[in-house]
Every structure is written in C-alpha cells, then in structure tokens.
Amino acid sequence: MSEAAVSKKNEKVGSVVSAKMAKTIVVEVMRRVPHPVYKRIISKRKKFYAHDEKGVAQVGDVVRIIECRPLSKLKRWELKEVVRKAVQVTTDLSSIGIEAAPEKRPSKKKGPKA
C-alpha cells in the first residue's frame, strides 16, 4: 500500500461537558436530523464517555473522539485531538485591581425551643 492507512473507525466531534474524572471526559455530540413525521429539523444530543490519557481536554473544548475497544462499562471512545480550546475565565480579581471581599460563613440560627 503506497497510501497511508485509512482508519475505518467511527469518529465524532463534540464539546466536553465534564472533565472531573481521572483520564475520562464526557463529550456531548449534537446532530441535526429531520423529525420522522413532521420533517422539521430538530437537534438531538448524546453523551459519550471518552478516554483522555494525558488529561489535555477541559470543559468547553471542542474535541474529536474515535471508537476503540471497551475500556470500562461506559467507555468505548478515546480522545483523538482537541479541535478548539475553550476560553478559560479567571476568577482572580486582583489581576484587574479589585480586592475580593472575605467569604461569609453561613450562620447557624436556631429557632426558639417550644
């Protein structure tokens, strides 16, 4: 074969909705399909658990995932590439010259005993 090996594995592109697990991300894939009866275009979405070995994907990133062997009960996909990184908003107010107020602890009010 003179050409590069073409992968026959299924690929999907979606956005990362959760990256809280170790080496696992949750990717939401949206697709637009016509309604079977009314023929109006509707959006369908499905979540896939994907293996992220290096932990490069963050919430909001657009990623490409590829089919692989079952890695756990729900994981059958792995991260191929990060298509677009999300803009990360910082909560450090001191960088723009605003002093943050100290956090208030909730008071434990007890009602009158009867």
Image (cartoon, helix red, strand yellow):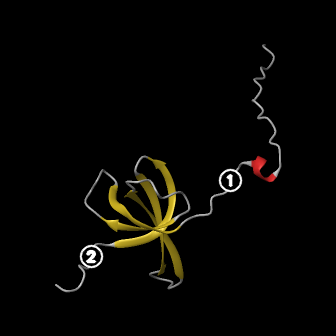
| Vertical arrangement, residue 105 with respect to residue 114, above or below | below
User: In the rendering, at what x and y percent does residue 91 appear?
Assistant: 71, 50
Q: Residue furthest top?
A: 114
- Indicate the quadrant where residue 10 lies: bottom left
| Vertical arrangement, residue 85 with respect to residue 91, above or below | below
Q: Amino acid at mark 2?
A: Ser
User: In the rendering, at what x and y percent does residue 108 appear?
Assistant: 75, 23
User: In the rendering, at what x and y percent does residue 53 appear?
Assistant: 37, 54
Q: Amino acid at mark 1?
A: Thr
Element carrying mark 1: loop
Mark 1 vs mark 2, CA separation in Å: 39 Å
Q: Is residue 37 left or right of residue 73?
A: right
Q: Residues within 10 Å of mark 1 (few under 14, many from 20)?
A: few
Residue 90's label in the rendered image is 1
Total numbered labels placed on residues in the image? 2
Front-most of residues 33 and 8: 8
Element carrying mark 2: loop
Residue corresponding to mark 2:
7
Q: Residue at x 34, y 55 (%)?
A: 75
Q: Nearer the viewer, mark 1 or mark 2?
A: 1
